[in-house]
Structure formats: C-alpha cells, structure tokens
Amino acid sequence: MKTAPYIFALLFIGLVFYLGMNHFELPTFFLLDKTEKTKGTVTNTEWTYGVKGYRLQLVTYEFEAKDSIYTDKFKVGKREGLQKIGDKILIEYSVDRPEKNEVVGYYRNQSEPIKTMKLESKK
C-alpha cells in the first residue's frame, strides 16, 4: 500500500482548509524580523465579495510607525465581527519595513455605552 498519495492529499486538504479560514489570503510571516505592536484606527469600510459569493467587509486602517503614517487593508468576516470607522485595532509590524504588517487584535470603540437588556420575571 502506498501512503505517499494519502499524505499528500491530507496536507493539501489541510492547506486549503487553512487558507479558507483566512479568506484565501496568504499569512504575513515575520521570520528573522524584529517586530513591534501598536494601535491603529479604522478609517474606512466597504463591502466586498469573498470566495463563493460571501460578503466580507474590506477595512482600511492606518497606524503610525517611525514618525510616518501607514495605510493598509484587510478583509473581515463573521469571526472577527463588524468593524466601524474609529474602532481601534492592534497591529504587529516589522520595524525595518512597517509596510509589512498584520492585524493581531481588535478593540471596540469605548465612547459608545454598552447596551444591556432588562430581564423581567413573570409571576
């Protein structure tokens, strides 16, 4: 029995599954790069279509590094949640090349109060 085709098929299925979970975008690797983290701000949002026609939010954000402001975009699905203009995000970037960056965390706009629902007991 030849196991090489089965191993190749499992690796291929795993790669397709991983890319599918990341909206078919290649991940950013920071091999041998010194990185820092900073807060960025969402400046614009648009709706776009992903694979299989699913709607995704295309988010434009900006962050400051080395006394310059950098702008980039990323796609957001249900897992990350709806982003609004003014929301803060956590960005990891390469110190040598800040244009090489990745969103690693999300904050919510704290100026809006958290809305709660009152539960009424029935007697």
Image (cartoon, rainbow, N blue to C red):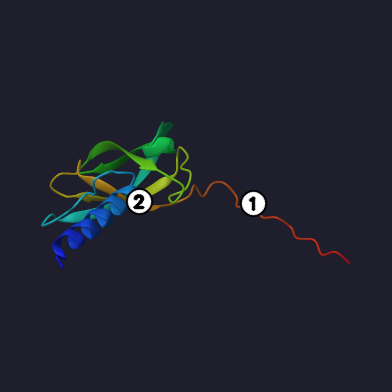
Q: Circle 2 — which element?
A: helix
Mark 1 highlights which residue?
A: 115
Q: Which mark is residue 97?
A: none
Q: Nearer the viewer, residue 34 or 73?
A: 73
Q: Residues within 10 Å of mark 2 (few under 14, many from 20)?
A: few
* Amino acid on which the number 2 mark rests in the picture: Met
The quarter of the rendered structure image containing the C terminus is bottom right
Give the mark nearest the N terminus, 2 or 1: 2
Percent coordinates x, y for residue 5 in the rendering = 17, 59
Q: Residue at x 18, y 52 (%)?
A: 29
Mark 2 highlights which residue?
A: 21
Q: Residue at x 22, y 49 (%)?
A: 28
Horizontal side of residue 36 vs 42, given as left or right: left
> Is residue 116 visible from the viewing direction of this image?
yes
Quarter of image, res 99: top left
Quarter of image, res 69: top left
Horizontal side of residue 87 vs 27, given as left or right: right
